[in-house]
Amino acid sequence: MALQLVAHVKIKSGGCIKVKGEVAPEAQSFALNLGQDESNLILHFNPRFDFHGDIRTIVCNSKTEGQWDTELREAEFPFQQGEETKICVSFDAEEITVELPEGQELRFPNRFGLEAADYFSVTGDLHVKSVKFK
């Protein structure tokens, strides 16, 4: 997966990371990662158009010291290849909320209980147009 963006910033709970981008016309998948660093993620948000045997599925997970935890899968899939999309990620010590297109929301447990994150990245088949940390 191509790395589109990496930000090393202090993101506090309650804030929102707004990502606006265009999904590649031949997209297989893309991912948003949030955590302490690449090996310690409170959220790996991975919409898969056709990737690793998953078709039109959102896979969420966390990672501790480079080891993946248990995946959660979401069948609702509001993304379209070749179209623009907006995603907003916010979190508190209990859970992470991902606001999806079409007013959908995905909730994932904050397995670390972190109140701040230092790392955010976007990888894969999403051409990032803007990222705002609010």
Image: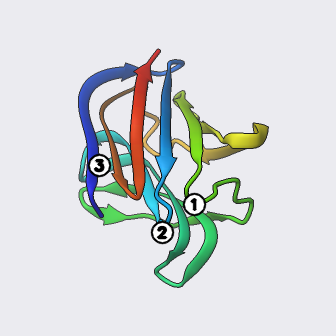
Residue linked to disc 1: 81
Q: Is residue 44 left or right of residue 35?
A: right
Q: What residue type is labelled 3?
A: Asn
Farthest bottom residue in view:
53
Residue 40 got which mark?
Answer: 3
- Determine whether label 1 and label 2 are within 8 Å by CB: yes
Relative image position of residue 50 (x, y in whole percent): 54, 76
Q: Is residue 104 visible?
A: no
Quick one: label 1, few (<14), some, or many (20+) residues within 10 Å?
some
Mark toward the start of the polypeptide (3 vs 1): 3
The nearer-to-camera label among 3 and 2 is: 2
- Determine whether label 3 and label 2 are within 8 Å by CB: no
State the separation of the CA atoms marked 3 and 2: 30 Å
Q: Is residue 62 above or below residue 113?
A: below
- Residue drawn at x 64%, y 55% is 79
The nearer-to-camera label among 3 and 1 is: 1
Mark toward the start of the polypeptide (1 vs 2): 2
State the separation of the CA atoms marked 3 and 1: 29 Å
Mark toward the start of the polypeptide (3 vs 2): 2
Residue linked to disc 2: 26
Q: Is residue 133 above or below residue 120?
A: above
Q: What residue type is labelled 1?
A: Gln
- Residue drawn at x 67%, y 46% is 106
- Determine whether label 3 and label 1 are within 8 Å by CB: no
State the separation of the CA atoms marked 1 and 2: 6 Å
